[in-house]
Image: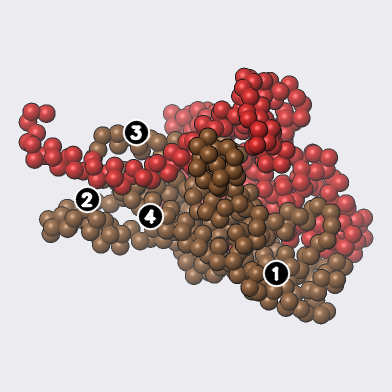
Chain colours: A red, B brown
Amino acid sequence: MARVKPAASAVRKKEALLAYSIIGPIYLWFLVLIIVPIGIGIFISFTEWNGLASHPTWVGLHNYSTFFSSPDYLLSLWRQIWIGGLGFVANTVIALVLALMLNVPMKLRGLFRSTFFVPSISSVATTTAVVIALLNPQSGPLNRALQSLGMEPVVWSYSTFWMVFWITAYNLWRSVGPTAIVWLAGLQSIDPTLYEAARIDGANRLQLIRYVTLPGLRPIASYIVITGLIGSMQMWDSVMFLSRGGPVGHTDVLMYRIYRDGLESFNMGMSGASSMVLGAVTLLLTFVYIQFFVRRQENA
Amino acid sequence: MKMTLFLKTLWLLLLIAIALIMIYPFVFAFIAGLFPKDDFTNIGSMLPIPKRVVTDWYVGLFEPAMLRPFFNTFFRTAWYTLAVTGMAFLVGYVLERLRFPGRSFFFFFIIVIQMVPGVLTLIPTYILMAKIPFLGGNDWLGTGGHGLINNPLVLYVLIGPANIVWIYLFRQSISALPRDFEEAASIDGSGFYRTLFTVILPIQLPIIATIALNTAIGTWNDWLNPFMYVNKLEYTTLTGYVGLLVSALSKFGDRNYPLIFAASTVATLPPLIIFLFMQKYIVQGFANAGIKG
């Protein structure tokens, strides 16, 4: 440090001061509105706290043991994993197919790309209403259409299969376009000369996909899978609007349960503990994916 | 790879069918908003044509009582667009270009925070807003009042992990920019802020547009926060109002579908218009996030 001239260290100090004065207030905002809530979440998960007007009582790990010993919560977690996971897999795969379909040069490609993107710029609140109206059991357009085809009308909301189907279909409708566009960006980032070279080596169409397209998509795949996994473990708004967790709780995903525990039945302790478990499961799935798929591919 | 004409037609028809599914709900909602309430209960058609057309539901949305939700949506969107974009611009730039102690810690913080699942902050943020000291009748321990619940201010202070992603994205964009621009400006005697706003800002406009437009659409469409934090029509937003109406649908009672669809259609129009004119930035930004992230 002896070699640094006084002037240089003054400049450095000024630069640091400038940096702190800019990011300081913004990081304070993050601290209060993100870090503090995470801290509160951890704290309340160890307390029994019914209603904001009362005081929380420390109960240690009691909420966690309730979570892992009650079939109710474990089933909610399982529903979050399988209903969320189903939507995630459907979205990822169908988006890739769509992207491959769009990756053919044609005149209307730009128009299709925009149209597929449009559902995602609408609010969940506004578009679920259409599905609810279509599924109306008595006069619903879908049931009328079924009847006119000579089929029996379905009471959609009594059937777990159909409620899961419509929740998945709705989420697919909303997010398949943007995911397809990310896949498409990945497809178009693959160097075209690689295809040329493979073709000269005598590769057929399937081999081109297997040995050029899929390896070229790896970086983008990890982005889609990680954001998709996190999103599917948080999926609940469409459940709340479309099925309210029904029939008889068969689509009651953990995230919706957390919302109700926190804001409807004011069981803050359980909502905190369930959040921690769901957060841990989300991070675990992400970690497993990175560890076993991304790393392995990098080594291969 | 040449495709036969038959295959090509099939391909095109399939894409057209998917495109129709994508826009169908919007068309349905627009038409359904034109029905008289009693006629709608028995529509029974996938593409209903109203026998009597009423514009009351649409017109009713522009009555004085609804002006507040409109303005709230507008101001909230404007505020978050400015705040989140400005935040990404400033923090992203500072983290990439300035040298200061703790720089790598602050960057690490951004990377970790953007991965935090939203579930961890949903209910605790509500508790924090209810128990925040000194505000809304609360004492220093956060008891005695309602805090910021049902206070219109609450819809302007919330910030979540999802907003942090943009800082990362902007930093990536700056790190790809050669330092020559700043060095030339500095030789010409331009100060830090002047360089930032007259040199960096113009070159980075595309990414800034991406951040601003996505934030604007996201904030406009946010029904959950108004739904959770305020329960008065004059404090909520248009989307929050629609969320309230739709969540009441699956409960028993009176269902006014045409009103919901008129409100939905009107609430969807601003994001749709922004998308139609600025889609290049929105779609491109989405694609870039995947490649750079």
**Mark closer to the chain start, 1 or 4:** 4
Residue assigned mark 2: B179
Question: Tag 1, which chain?
Answer: B
Query: What's the residue type where badge 4 is placed?
Result: Gly
**Mark closer to the chain start, 4 or 2:** 4
Instruction: Choose mark 2 or mark 3, whichever is in front.
Output: 3
Residue assigned mark 3: B105
Query: What's the residue type where badge 1 is placed?
Result: Ala
Residue assigned mark 1: B262
Instruction: Choose mark 1 or mark 2, whichever is in front.
Output: 1
Residue assigned mark 4: B86
Contact, mark 2 vs mark 3 (Cβ under 8 Å): no
Dot 4, how many residues are within 10 Å of its Cα: few (below 14), some (14-19), or many (20+)? some
Apparent side of residue A140 relative to residue B181 in the rendered image (left or right): right
Report how far apart the C-alphas of labels 1 and 2 lie in the structure. Answer: 52 Å
Q: In which quarter of the image is the N terminus of chain A?
A: top left
Tell me the quarter of the picture where residue A268 sits: top right
